[in-house]
Amino acid sequence: MKQKVAIIGAFVAFAVVLILVVGGGGKKKGGDKPAPGPAVGTGSGPGTAPAGKVTVEFLYSSEKKDWVDAAVVEFEKANPDVDVVATSKGSLDAATGILDGSLKPVLWSPADSLIVNLLATDWQTKYGKRPFPADGEAGPQQLLLSPLVFAVWEDRAKVLMAASGGDGLTWKAIHKAVTSPKGWSAIGGKPGWGFVKLGHTDPNKSNSGLQALLLMTLEYYTKTSGLTVDELLDEKYQTWVKEIEKGVPTFEASTGTFMTDMVRFGPSKYDIAVVYESLAISQLENAQGRWGNLRIYYPPVTLWSDHPVVMLGGDWVTPAQAKAGERLIAYLRGHEAQSMALRFGFRPADTSLPLKTSDGANPFTRLAQYGLALELPEAATAPDGAVVRNLLMMWSRVARPQ
């Protein structure tokens, strides 16, 4: 009898343990809280921060990934109560995702103010209000600076500048070279160079392509600001842009992709690339000696990638996230993070920091021989969102070669 009782007791105990194990299978090890859900940055809903921490979703443009990664590590060391989930995404794609609600970050930093203006206009049209203030401390704040430049094989650049009549490397000189059926030989280049091959990204997919389109438009109208929608409807202007775009073999979605191809394949692929200065810096030393010298040239009027950061005024942002987001913005604009900018080829938004230093790793000192300059030409002003939207529409409908 005692033996039967012992067997029954053992069986009951085993059943209880089994129930506890199976019932606890949905919890993390320790059973104190559920596993984190998907992050806001993916557009799937709010993430779950580690116990005692506030999660801040930070969506940023991909070209500054290395700088953001390094800065976030240092920020979290100094702010252990904040968990930053940093996600890189192309500026135009990010703006589209925020507008349609599939992306819901706390902070967003596209490549430049063009995209900030575009989202603000589209958001106002769709929802009847702004997604963030236009200015002031709560408005867009600059993080980094990088002008748009031409990266050109030096022998080609000399021919282009001679053809421009002393005006430097201009869009008008590029237009003259691209439209000639005789290619390089029509403007003094070698016949063996063939046709002029221009590289810039698809303006509807990449911010640098949009900047290139805007700069060629401003040069056509001899402007640095005040571009209007009416001017984009002018047929002569549209034809001029279309003729330039015939010189682009492929409109890539990524600036880094065609810049890498330019270095890898040389002038057989691209003679001229329109890229961010920071990206050109990252490739300059790799290019030297492969196909001649690759140099940076600044257009007569340039355009800044000012990498603004904004806090989105969506109902998904909690007061705790807003306060933590403000701390992250302050850190990214502070001395420590801004000093890191040079290391990654960016100009700090903090103008009190010098570009020329004694640091041997500083690219603005090390790469000056390849055309990198401290003093820059006049910078254009980003137009409002309505002009940007119509500029993209014009390119898609009229100027893009079919």
Image (cartoon, rainbow, N blue to C red):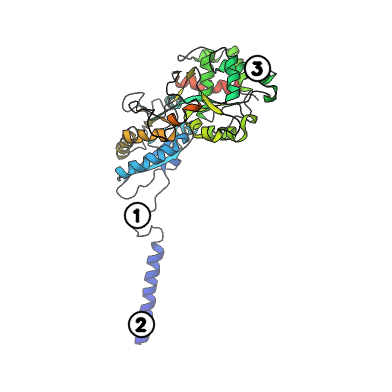
On screen, residue 283 above or below 232: below
Q: Is residue 362 visible?
A: yes
70 relative position to 257: left or right: left
71 or 364, which lies in front? 364
Q: Earlier in the sequence, mark 1 or mark 2?
A: 2
The label nearer to you, 1 versus 2, is: 1
List x then y, in percent, for residue 320.
30, 40
Look at 37% across and 70% down and name the residue there.
16
Secondary structure at numbered mark 3:
loop
* Label placed on residue 188: 3
Disc 2 residue type? Ala
User: Cα distance, mark 3 to mark 2?
Assistant: 102 Å
Quadrant into which the N terminus falls: bottom left
List x then y, in percent, for residue 377.
45, 18
324 or 252, which lies in front? 252
308 or 2, which lies in front? 308
* Label placed on residue 6: 2
- Label 1 crowd bin: few (<14), some (14–19), many (20+), radius 10 Å: few
* Label placed on residue 33: 1
Q: Earlier in the sequence, mark 3 or mark 2?
A: 2
Q: Earlier in the sequence, mark 3 or mark 1?
A: 1
Disc 3 residue type? Gly
164 or 73, which lies in front? 164
Quarter-of-image position of residue 384? top left
